[in-house]
């Protein structure tokens, strides 16, 4: 490599790093302003805090009952995810293995909802959920995600199961395995990579989801999610930016921490999901 | 007798395996959808016990005399077209740079991807803070005119802001799709083009871009489906303002249903959105199908 070539490479590298830092500058500003007092935010947003204060965090932590919301998010996400994976994988397996008209129709019914925009049914979803007593509860919301997550999950699982040789089922059947036993002992372990993809896409979606939780669990401070609390908080404190930014940082921090540790897998899962979906 | 038994057993098993998912999608989609169709033919404020049946009046009114809907539809179309074009062009450019074996590649990919893992509503609020407070400070310290413009206060600028923030949030997603696509372009093809004397631009258009076609298909499809439904970011960034100029179709439906309590009317709009999405998807899928056959 010639010297000028190397210089060009270094310049390119430097330009890209500066660009990426500029790209993330808004997040940096949100973070530093969460450590300032109201006066400091108002006098200069871009300066570093004169006195780093954790007071905003203590205040918001208590005010929105952060541990409670964190628990809510976790319950909703874990419950939703467990159901999506379980219900969709068994169905997709059976649908991929059964060659019949009925099977084709059921598969179509399962994946067709991918075409329905959520806003087209938001009001009537709320009414249905109220009728079934699923609204105003984190458990109910988690259960609802089973249906909303199923179409994509069935689609991805279905495509994957088709690639698993059928002889595997048959030899397992000769060994006496059948039904759920066969599925969970032989097939499900083979679906590990695709399950990981679904888990990654769905965790990002459910953890950050806004509109469905807004309709379903926004009524009481004890059932809210992190995003909802941040949203309501800003509504109440329109000009108290130091608190608003604190609430934002607290809402996004879990995602960023998880991303830092699992970056490689998350990016891989998102790409795999997009390519298959 | 044994075969009869086995047949029923396998039917039963089919039912046990598929019934749970059918119940789930019925509750989440099909029951609400049928109700949407029914309510769209009624006049209903959500309070009275019995929605009044009015046939297709809602649809007639939406198409003939609803300036809100027309504006929202126009906004959404403009937004979707610009979003799809800009995000794909920018993501391809960035992916090409990242593919050039930079040492900081891992960091760069992570940096551009981070906003994508954040909730759109929160991204909207953070940018609202930047536009309203941050730009003031930046204007003071740099003196640049660009920071002194009212990015959320003027209709044209607010549109750009919504578009910009959406792109900022999701470009990482498209970037990783294109990076993955570029990695599947065989290196010897590019080398062969170099040997044939093709310059970087020629190489890009004659070798890389055609081989990137599957990635482009996916990315355009995702960009289209996401942009027609744009909602969260507008809610927190502009709230539909200034003067109601940044209402998208989805947000307009939300406004009619939950703010104006026009339940019947709002669901009629919701149904129109569904039909629009359906038509666009079918057209898109058939175009892609045909292209893939040719390729």
Image: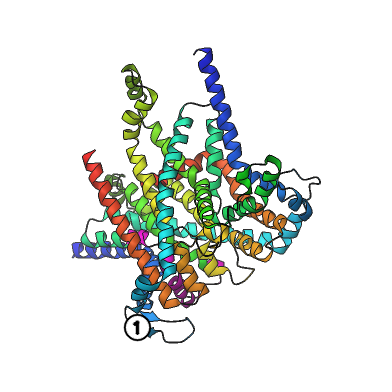
Tell me if mark 1 has few (under 14), some (14-19) or many (20+) residues whose alpha carbon lies within 10 angstroms of its own.
some
Q: Is residue B15 above or below residue B143?
A: below
Q: What is the chain identity of the residue bearing mark 1?
A: B
Q: Which residue is mark 1?
A: B54
Instruction: Assign the C terminus of chain B to one quadrant of the image.
Output: top left
Q: Is residue A244 above or below residue A220?
A: above
Residue B13 in the image: state x and y as whole percent. Answer: 31, 62
| Left or right: residue B205 compared with residue B252 | left
Q: Which residues lie in the magenta part?
A: A110-139
**Which residue corresponds to the image point at 55% horizontal and 54% vertical from the top-left?**
B119
Instruction: Assign the N terminus of chain B to one quadrant of the image.
Output: bottom left
Q: How many marks?
A: 1
Inspect the magenta stretch and tell me whether residue A122 lies in it: yes
Residue B77 in the image: state x and y as whole percent. Answer: 39, 56
Inspect the magenta stretch and tell me whether residue B219 lies in it: no
Q: Nearer the viewer, residue A180 or A10?
A: A10
**Dominant SS type (magenta):** helix
Q: Is residue A148 above or below residue B166?
A: below
Query: Can residue B31 be seen?
Result: no
Residue extending furthest right?
A51
Q: Nearer the viewer, residue A173 or B71?
A: B71
Element under disc 1:
loop
Query: Can residue B254 be seen?
Result: yes
Residue extending furthest top?
A2
**Which residue corresponds to the image point at 19% horizontal and 65% vertical from the top-left?**
B4
């Amino acid at each position: 490599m010639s010297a000028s070539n190397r210089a060009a490479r270094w310049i390119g590298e430097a330009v890209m790093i500066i660009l990426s830092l500029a790209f993330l500058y808004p997040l940096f500003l949100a973070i530093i302003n969460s450590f300032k007092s109201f006066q400091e935010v108002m006098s200069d947003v871009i300066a570093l805090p004169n006195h780093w204060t954790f007071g905003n965090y203590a205040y918001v932590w208590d005010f929105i009952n952060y541990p409670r919301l964190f628990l809510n998010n976790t319950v909703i996400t874990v419950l939703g995810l467990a159901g999506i994976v379980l219900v969709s994988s068994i169905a997709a397996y059976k649908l991929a293995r059964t060659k019949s008209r009925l099977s084709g129709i059921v598969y179509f019914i399962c994946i067709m909802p991918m075409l329905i925009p959520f806003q087209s049914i938001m009001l009537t979803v709320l009414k249905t959920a109220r009728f079934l007593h699923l609204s105003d509860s984190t458990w109910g919301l988690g259960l609802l995600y089973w249906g909303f997550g199923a179409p994509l999950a069935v689609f991805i699982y279905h495509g994957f199961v088709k690639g698993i040789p059928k002889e595997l089922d048959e030899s397992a059947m000769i060994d006496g395995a059948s039904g759920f036993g066969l599925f969970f002992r032989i097939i499900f372990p083979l679906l590990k990579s695709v399950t990981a993809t679904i888990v990654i896409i769905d965790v990002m979606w459910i953890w950050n989801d806004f509109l469905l939780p807004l309709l379903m669990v926004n009524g009481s401070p004890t059932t809210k999610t992190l995003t909802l609390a941040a949203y309501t908080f800003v509504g109440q404190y329109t000009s108290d930016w130091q608190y608003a930014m604190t609430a934002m940082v607290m809402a996004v921090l879990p995602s960023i921490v998880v991303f830092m540790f699992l970056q490689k897998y998350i990016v891989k899962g998102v790409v795999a999901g997009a390519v298959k979906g | 007798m044994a075969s009869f038994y086995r047949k029923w057993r396998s039917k039963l098993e089919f039912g046990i395996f598929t019934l749970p998912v059918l119940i789930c999608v019925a509750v989440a989609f099909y029951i609400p959808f049928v109700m949407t169709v029914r309510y769209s033919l009624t006049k209903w404020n959500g309070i009275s016990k019995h929605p009044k049946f009015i046939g297709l009046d809602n649809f007639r009114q939406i198409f003939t005399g609803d300036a809100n809907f027309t504006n929202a539809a126009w906004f959404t179309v403009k937004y979707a077209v610009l979003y799809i074009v800009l995000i794909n062009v920018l993501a391809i450019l960035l992916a090409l740079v990242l593919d050039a074996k930079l040492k900081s590649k891992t960091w760069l990919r992570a940096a551009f991807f981070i906003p994508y893992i954040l909730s759109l509503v929160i991204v909207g609020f953070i940018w609202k803070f930047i536009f309203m407070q941050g730009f003031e400070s930046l204007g003071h310290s740099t003196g640049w005119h660009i920071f002194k413009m009212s990015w959320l206060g003027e209709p044209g600028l607010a549109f750009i802001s919504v578009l910009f923030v959406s792109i900022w949030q999701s470009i990482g997603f498209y970037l990783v799709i294109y990076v993955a696509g570029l990695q599947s372009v065989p290196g010897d093809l590019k080398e062969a083009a170099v040997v044939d004397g093709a310059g970087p631009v020629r190489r890009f258009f004659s070798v890389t871009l055609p081989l990137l076609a599957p990635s482009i298909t996916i990315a355009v499809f995702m960009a289209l489906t996401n942009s027609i439904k744009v909602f969260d970011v507008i809610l927190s960034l502009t709230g539909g303002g200034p003067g109601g100029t940044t209402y998208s179709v989805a947000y307009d439906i939300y406004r009619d249903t939950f703010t104006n309590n026009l339940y019947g009317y709002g669901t009629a709009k919701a149904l129109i959105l569904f039909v629009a999405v359906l038509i666009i998807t079918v057209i898109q899928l058939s175009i892609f199908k045909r292209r893939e056959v040719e390729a």
